[in-house]
Image (cartoon, rainbow, N blue to C red):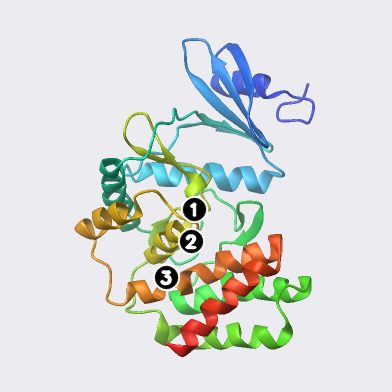
Amino acid sequence: MSAGGDVEEPADVAARLTGLAVTGVHRMAGALTEVALDGGRSVVVKRGDGPGEVRAEAAGLRWLADAGTVRIPRVYGDDSRWLVTDRVPQGRPTAEAALRFGRQLAALHASGAPAFGAPPPGGPVAAYIGLAPMRNEPGTDWPHWYAEHRVLPYLRDAVDAGTVRSAEAALVEHVCERLPGLAGPAEPPARLHGDLWNGNVLWGVDAHVWLIDPAAHGGHRETDLAMLDLFGCPHLDQVLDGYVDVAPLADGWRERVGLHQLFPLLVHAVLFGRGYAEQALAVARAAVAG
């Protein structure tokens, strides 16, 4: 069998990339497989849709782990098709863990990035947010970069898909034009997880929060916080309390949450339909009205 090829099984991948013997296999949801290894360790083997997806995720995990802040599963190896990471034993969300996570997330963001849109070291420009393409093209200021490389590409895709009408697109374009005045005080590029919805936040049995499946890049720190808010996060108030204890947010950040949610909402509009487009348009109307 060829390394990383289509005929290779997850157990074979785990053995190849960890150098340990396999003692058990458990199929998980989607493209994930849990593999038990000699010595009692368990790993998650993930099959990607293409080399760019795997490479982007592996580079992102390593970049986030390099900051030494939030808990990140160890990456054992990756190749053109497969990614092998430590399995995180999960517990229950607690307020104490949430407060700690908020402080660690603030420290992660403060570890910085070379530029807005900068990919992780070794990560591709053609990256992903979930299964959706996302280009990590560096830019010099957040409002123009966010409009050009996040919002407008998916707005065009949503119009092409028929989930946003051409007349409605003009409203979002108007928000993009006004972003320099809506975005708040300028901030340096933060080291973002980039896809920080609740499904990528694991509450470990060790009373720590672990982060998986990043769309890591240099961005605005309010973006990660807006993603936590978009689909709900246990003990979010405690997460935010911990965050501002370490790194206070600029005045008006709560009013800017919708602006940072505009990109993921448009991504979901393209992938899942009109309901998310209506949410994106509501955000745009609120921004204009504000």
Measure the alpha-carbon separation of dots 2 and 1: 7 Å
Horizontal and vertical percent position of residue 103: 26, 50
Q: Is residue 140 visible?
A: no
Amino acid beneath label 1: Trp
Horizontal and vertical percent position of residue 167: 70, 88
Crowding around mark 3 (Cα neighbors within 10 Å: few <14, some 14 to 19, many 20+) is some
Horizontal and vertical percent position of residue 127: 61, 55
In this rendering, the answer to whether 183 lies above or below 103 is below
149 and 206: which is toward the camera: 206
267 and 275: which is toward the camera: 275
282 and 40: which is toward the camera: 282
Q: Earlier in the sequence, mark 2 or mark 1?
A: 1
Residue that carries the numbered disc 3 in the rendered image = 257
Quadrant where the N terminus sits is top right
Amino acid beneath label 2: Leu
In this rendering, the answer to whether 155 lies above or below 244 is below
Which dot marks residue 197? 1
Quadrant where the C terminus sits is bottom left
129 and 197: which is toward the camera: 197
Q: Is residue 143 visible?
A: yes
- The residue drawn where x is 38% and y is 63% is 221
Measure the alpha-carbon separation of dots 1 and 3: 14 Å
Residue that carries the numbered disc 2 in the rendered image = 230
